[in-house]
């Protein structure tokens, strides 16, 4: 069984819920959320053996829902991050959406990382030999705003765009702190599933994603942000 973290009643009725899945880093999570907040969250065992644990965790979450509750949609982190992890989460979300006849919306995993403090911050995921994936944001009280779009860059190029940033939020603080020669206050965090829920709501409020919510989807655009080996090989062969 998985640790089930509750921030609301175990039996949720007369409420529209979102199922949230993120498997893009080694700290994967599934959760249920409503407009009122996070209902249940189940962090998966740390590591990249996600496919073995994902569906049992989802099944456990769904068992805690009242039959009167309505699952309105599935929200899934689409990267950047682990190439295999992104595909596992997206495939699971699409399969469940198709089977349950529920819409699926993809949001960037980086929106699940945010500073605990007011001010400019950067959400960062280690891209290993590819440098870092990042997204700039700012917090003022309970308001969190993200700027631009998710990026991948070498560490040197990335920090050249981080002027005014005070905080770095990441699941990989231990790995990145020593590599980034910049005076930042580091926060190590797992992906926050409720922030992914709020990210999906922001997209809808901005007029984006409405077509995704209309019908169950058969595909998702993943944020690889770098070429896969097959693409590299194809270009090399030209």
Image (cartoon, grey):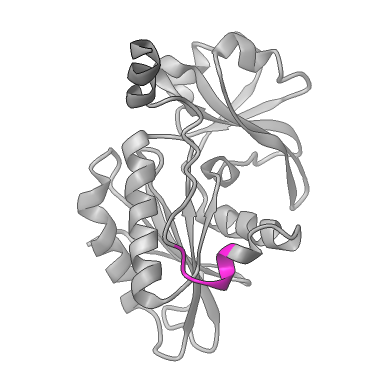
Q: Residue at x 62, y 41 (%)?
A: 114
Residue farthest to the front? 238
Does the segment drawn in magenta span residue 61?
Answer: no
Q: Which residues are magenta?
A: 212-217
Q: Residue at x 30, y 41 (%)?
A: 46
Q: Which residue is more in the foreground, 231 or 65? A: 231
Q: Position of residue 210 (x, y in %)?
A: 65, 65
Q: Residue at x 36, y 78 (%)?
A: 64
Question: Which quadrant would the C terminus be assigned to in this image?
Answer: top left
Q: Which residue is more in the foreground, 51 or 217? A: 217
Q: Position of residue 237 (x, y in %)?
A: 33, 13
Q: Position of residue 44 (x, y in %)?
A: 31, 51
Q: Position of residue 227 (x, y in %)?
A: 43, 25
Position of 128 relative to 87 (above/below)? above
Q: Residue at x 48, y 19 (%)?
A: 176
Figure quadrant of residue 156:
top right
> How many numbered marks are there?
0
Question: Which quadrant would the N terminus be assigned to in this image?
Answer: bottom left
Q: Which residue is more in the foreground, 98 or 171? A: 98
């Amino acid at each position: 069984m998985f640790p089930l973290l509750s921030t609301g009643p175990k039996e949720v009725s007369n409420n529209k819920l979102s199922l949230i899945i993120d498997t893009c880093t080694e700290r994967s999570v599934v959760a249920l959320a409503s407009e009122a907040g996070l209902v249940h969250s189940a962090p998966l065992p740390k590591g990249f053996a996600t496919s073995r644990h994902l569906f049992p965790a989802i099944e456990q979450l769904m068992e805690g829902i009242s039959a009167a509750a309505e699952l309105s949609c599935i929200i899934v982190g689409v990267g950047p991050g682990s190439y295999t992890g992104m595909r596992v989460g997206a495939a699971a979300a699409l399969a469940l959406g198709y089977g349950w006849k529920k819409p699926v919306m993809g949001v960037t995993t980086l929106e699940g990382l945010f500073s605990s403090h007011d001010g400019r911050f950067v959400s960062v995921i280690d891209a290993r030999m590819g440098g870092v994936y990042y997204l700039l944001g700012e917090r003022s009280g309970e308001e969190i705003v993200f700027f631009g779009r998710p990026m991948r860059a070498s560490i040197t190029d990335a920090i050249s765009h981080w002027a005014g940033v005070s905080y770095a939020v990441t699941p990989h603080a231990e790995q990145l702190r020593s590599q980034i020669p910049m005076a930042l206050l580091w926060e190590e965090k797992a992906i926050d599933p409720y922030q992914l829920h709020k990210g999906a709501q922001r997209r809808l409020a901005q007029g984006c994603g409405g077509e995704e919510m209309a019908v169950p989807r058969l595909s998702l655009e993943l944020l690889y942000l770098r070429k896969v080996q097959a693409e590299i090989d194809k270009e090399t062969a030209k």
